[in-house]
Amino acid sequence: MGLTAVNRKARLPDLSRVPAVDEVGVNERVARFQSRSIKKAAKVDALKLILSMIDLTTLEGQDTPGKVQQLCQKAIHLHDAMPGLPHVAAVCVYPTMVATAKEALSGHDINIASVATAFPSGMSTLSVKLDDTRMAVKAGATEIDMVISRGAFLSGDYRFVFDEIVAVKEACGDAHLKVILETGELGTLDRVRKASMLAMYAGADFIKTSTGKIQPAATMQVTLVMLQAIRDYYYETGRMVGMKPAGGISTSKLAIHYLVMLHETLGNAWMTPEWFRFGASSLANDVLMQLMKQSTGVYQSPDYFSKD
Amino acid sequence: MATPENKLAFDGGWGYAPAPESTDHIQVKKRYGLFINGEFVAPEKGSYFDTVNPATEEKLSRIADAGDADVDKAVAAAREAYRTTWGRMKPAERGKYIYRIARIIQERAREFSVIESLDGGKPIRESRDVDVPLAAAHFFYYAGWADKLQFAFPGRTAKPLGVAGQVIPWNFPLLMAAWKIAPALACGNTVVLKPAETTPLTALKLAEVCRDAGLPPGVVNIVTGAGATGAAIINHPGVDKVAFTGSTNVGRIIQKALAGTNKKYTLELGGKAANIVFADAAIDQAVEGIVNGIFFNQGHVCCAGSRLFVQESVADEVVSKLKDRMETLIVGDPLDKNTDIGAINSRMQLEKIESYLKIGKSEGGEMHQSACRVPKKGYWCRPTIFTGVSQSNRVVQEEIFGPVLAIQTFRRFDEAITKANNTPYGLSGGIWTDKGSKIFKMTQSVRAGVIWANTFNKFDPTSPFGGYKESGVGREGGLHGLDAYVKLGV
Amino acid sequence: MAAKRIAVAKTYKIYIGGKFPRTESGRYFPLEDKDGKVIANMCRGSRKDFRNAVVAARKAQSGWAKASAYLRGQILYRIAEMLEGRREQFIAELQQQGSSKRAAEKEVDTSIDRLIYFAGWADKFQQVFSSVNPVSSSHFNFSVFEPTGVVAMLAPDDSSLLGLVSNIAPAIVGGNSCVILGSERKPLCAVSFAEVLHASDVPGGVVNVLTGFRSELTEYFASHMDVNAIVYCDGGKAVARTVQELAADNIKRVIERTRVDWTGTEAENPYLIRDTQEVKTTWHPIGT
């Protein structure tokens, strides 16, 4: 399996050295981001950047090729009535839908992200998870969103979680690996911080908050803690790791708060789709409405923006 | 963690567009008289001084300079009101007036915030989110005490003192007025208050509020002026109680001036608080606490965490994170909603801070300032830290009252405590550790009136505030803040 | 008939840091009874004695403050026990200095009871006066009382035992240490009370007792920079002014207890403890 070779390279970090996190302090910092006032040109820039960072997502049991094709159309044609818009960063689908997405997006510079590893629970064997991953990559996924084994993590078996990530990373080949911590199940910000460090040391290209199937999904609090972990990891290793909050970010205002947080925590280098994504399905239309409002000065109706 | 060599970049890139708070709803008169006996009157000698916007150096208004005769009038009005109305009023009714003041401040909150920032230079985010709401909350809190004083002093009856002479500083103009006036009124005293000469406007606006609340004339009198006016109030024989917030030097002069009189007094004076970060702290929140501790209100805070002690094993990490964080602080227009650090309150204060920067460097300290741009006009100081300094340096010993932090390291717990207490001040202290028992040990060991454990610069009307040693006498806020305004009988 | 036994007279010394030295100044003042007979040569304490006493008080203070409230209460109770045991001696001393027998008895008995009274407050005044403050943010916030530190005291001249005890007890029950100047006119009980303290498990330095001239020592008591509070019990405006002016040099807490009826509730209430206490407020976040 090649696992041992990889294991020698990746070393489980000493998680006892990961700094503690104080929840109230995090809340206060988040409140400061939320009190930033983003207006005019800064707002337009932010909205466009947000669009370009979206992983347009459909992850439902009822997904069909038809649904995925429509989603891909939206990814390509966000709102053609408005010239000069960026396209989204990726579409995010189940492994069985990757081929459909690939075909629908052919000729466009839009990534195909696939959840894998027995998403969303991750309750399966490593071999099933690796097969899941390889299948998605083979079908054309350029990004893999895996879930960690939360049960193992909560029971303290960090080695197990770490090894799984290392193995999946290897199975990804050239595809980027996003590691979903499912922060809503980790319970405390201390664990979020530890899991973030563990995932990055195991080889994650991105760390991601949530599957979207568990409440709470992404919050600014957990995202801040993960961004700070990314910063610490960067300080230590010099390697940049991306961040993807997913689930629950459906308004422009909230997305702008996230951007402010990113901007003031990791700085300019991370302010691109290469290093930051929003996992969202309905955010794009709200951003489009806001952009239209900025250019026309008139408040918009959702009826004028396509829902796919 | 090793010293980070991989730098984050915060300059350039996406910048926030200016987001100025609107001033078109603000009414500042060209000239303000003295608020005596329920109305604005011209000063006897007819002299006025300018109050200036420290961010633009533009004149905002002309302010009456009260002389002895004016202070006499104000004290007489306060005495008369104490004798005839306020001192005799049913406590519950007194409380209702104070509630009204709280409500009117809430209604006019935005106006107060904008004027506070215009006159004093503090960022609108702070005047809007901290100063003004807290001022209203103070009135609200103490209003409720008016008819419950017997429960505050078990076994005793609390009687008012009479006329309170109050002199407040320029760092939290409205909030300090609230800290002074609210408990005084609740306990049945009347008030002659002097705001600082650089920041008189919100106190004068508060006078309008008192008038609009229907407060009987003379219960609250606001007289403006500089040091001489303050001295006239404090030394006035008709004043029964003195409350002062300001520097330890002036506090000392006041305490001496009051010697041999029977005036009761409270003094809220200077500080040089230690903010102590242990290796096991929540480091990122500690860094926030350091920033909040020293850069809040441009460091014009008597309880500012101006001495940072970091345990050696995390010192590099903390200082490096602090430097990164400093790069994200926005210095500039106080009225911009995104401004983190506003204008230094006055030219004089700026000169004082700058002299300390020179002193710090000449003492061998390594100075680091954030790279932010500051406006050409106005009084500004970039957030500044000194490393490589020690207890024997003046920037470590003396209160600078600006955004200047002196950083030292320590190895052991008792070393941190010894250094923290190695100061004539004792107003506040900060402790950052994830270990509960250590927090309690620390809070017991630091000789200071307010201890922030895993937080800093928090204020609340219910929470007593005040210092040990040369940081002052007495407490303001909370149940214990009532003491200063009552005489206890059996 | 056997020859009349020669009584052994006591040498009255001062009490500093748990020891009974003579004044470093080598000076004395004679204490005479109403017939002009010298009862004792009292130490005329000097500013250096005071300085030494403050050093001792400072050294002892933090340890005393850390002693449990229960222990401090027990020690105050122990002082009362020891005083009770030497009741006759104190009555005799008071009589020697001009009190009637009845007055002397009353003063000693009240002093013993007063110690018991304050002993009982040791573990209660904190509960009565401290508070948990319901702040609006997500913080647990509480205010407790801590001793001010080293308290310098000028004991009342007229009530030489009861006045002395009524000042010492509330200060030390709250964890302060003190340096007290005994009555100038009737100094015997101050020294004898120091002997009682010495026999009562009060750690050395917690209470330091000087005798001497008020006019000579007041300014040093008020101006010493390592004293946190000063209590004065006599004197008119001039004394008050001197004390308060000098106290301002390091912002001492100044506690005036002039014209106090030491036999009444004015001298027996927990607010006297609070006079030499500081309020410390602690904030801590409530979170996970």
Image: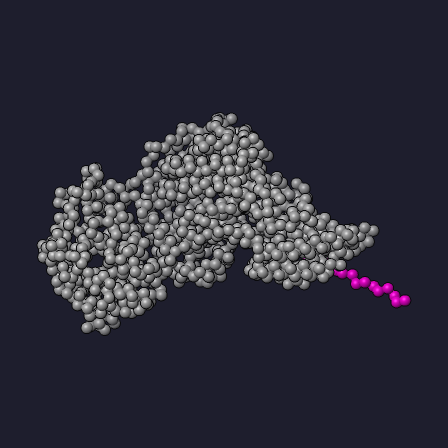
Q: Residue B196 at what x, y percent from top left?
A: 47, 37
**To which quarter of the image does residue B239 belong?**
top right
Q: Quadrant of the N terminus of chain A?
A: bottom left
Image coords of residue C177 (percent x, y) = 61, 56
Magenta: main secondary structure: loop
Say if the magenta span includes residue C14: yes
Magenta span contains residue A215:
no
Of residues B78 and B149, the one drawn nearer to the viewer in this rendering: B149
Q: How many marks can you see?
A: 0
Q: Residue furthest front?
A: A62
| Residue A57 location (% of width, % of height) | 19, 54
A227 on left or right of B288 = left
Closer-to-camera residue (A117/B218): A117
Q: Nearer the viewer, residue A286 or B221?
A: A286
Is C249 on the left or on the right of A195, as rendered?
right
Furthest residue to the right? C1
Q: Is residue C190 visible?
A: yes
Q: Is residue C163 above or below residue B18?
A: below
Range covered by the magenta-colored residues: C1-15
Depicted B181 relative to depicted C33: above or below? above
Type of colouring: one colour
Q: Nearer the viewer, residue C270 or C18?
A: C270
Image coordinates for residue B417, horizontal then vertical, percent: 49, 58
Does residue C223 show up? no
Residue at the spot 64% in from the left edge and 63% down from the top edge:
C201
Q: Residue at x 78, y 61 (%)?
A: C9
Q: Residue at x 50, y 42 (%)?
A: B145
- For the point 48% across and 36% down, the residue is B96
In the rendered structure, the answer to whether residue C198 lies left or right of residue A266 reads right
